[in-house]
Image (cartoon, grey):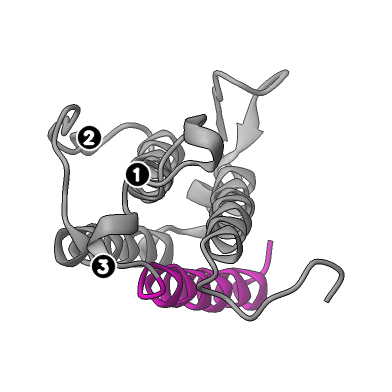
Amino acid sequence: MSQAEVAELVDLLEDSYRRLVDTLALFSEEHLDFAPQGYGNTVRGQIMHSCYSDLLCLNLADGGSRPLPEERVGKRPNTQELRGLIEETRTEVLHTLRAMSEEELRREVHVPWAAGPRSAFWLMMHTLRHIHYHLGQLTTYAYLLGLSKWQPGQ
């Protein structure tokens, strides 16, 4: 990958974290535990999972050189704490990605859920895809709650 490709990925990730914060702003504190029909991950859970997964991918991509965040299972962060988690994740991911050399980004790493080894760059691209997957879920939750003007098919 070229420096231009890395710069584009950084820009896309930056925009994606901004969108995650903007989407979180649609929900009030009382909506953070919403899950469609009471099934699946909640608004709070979607954001926590997205951030923790991004940090796991980052840890795999850079060879596991950083400790993973303190486990927060059972904790129920409020909106302000979730915004802080998104910002911490954004800062860590973008700082590390910018600092990685082309050689480090080409290095193959074991990805437990993939069929075989993948490059660190692939893993960071996966992070981008994963954020957008959860943004889609959160947008759907906002629609179901009547908090979004989005309509299916738009």
- Residues under numbered marks 3 and 1 in contact, where contact means CB atoms less than 8 Å apart: no
Q: Is 74 rendered above or below residue 105?
A: above
Q: Is residue 8 on the magenta stretch?
A: yes
The residue indicated by pointer 3 is 87
Q: Position of residue 135 (x, y in %)?
A: 56, 60
- Residues under numbered marks 2 and 1 in contact, where contact means CB atoms less than 8 Å apart: yes
**Residue 128 in which image quadrant:** bottom right
Q: Position of residue 103 (x, y in %)?
A: 53, 50
Amino acid under disc 1: Leu
Q: Is 92 rendered above or below residue 16?
A: above
The numbered dot on residue 68 is 2
* Residue at 54 percent of width and 36 percent of height: 37
Q: Is residue 68 left or right of residue 59?
A: left
Secondary structure under the numbered disc 2 in the rendered image: loop
Question: What whole-number distance in Å separates the C-alpha atoms at marks 2 and 3?
Answer: 16 Å
Q: Is residue 60 on the magenta stretch?
A: no
Q: Residues within 10 Å of mark 2 (few under 14, many from 20)?
A: few
Secondary structure under the numbered disc 1 in the rendered image: helix
**Residue 64 in which image quadrant:** top left
Amino acid under disc 3: Glu
Q: Is 93 rendered above or below residue 120?
A: below
Q: Report the magenta residues as a range.
A: 1-26
Q: Quadrant of the C terminus?
A: bottom right
Provide the major secondary structure of the magenta segment: helix
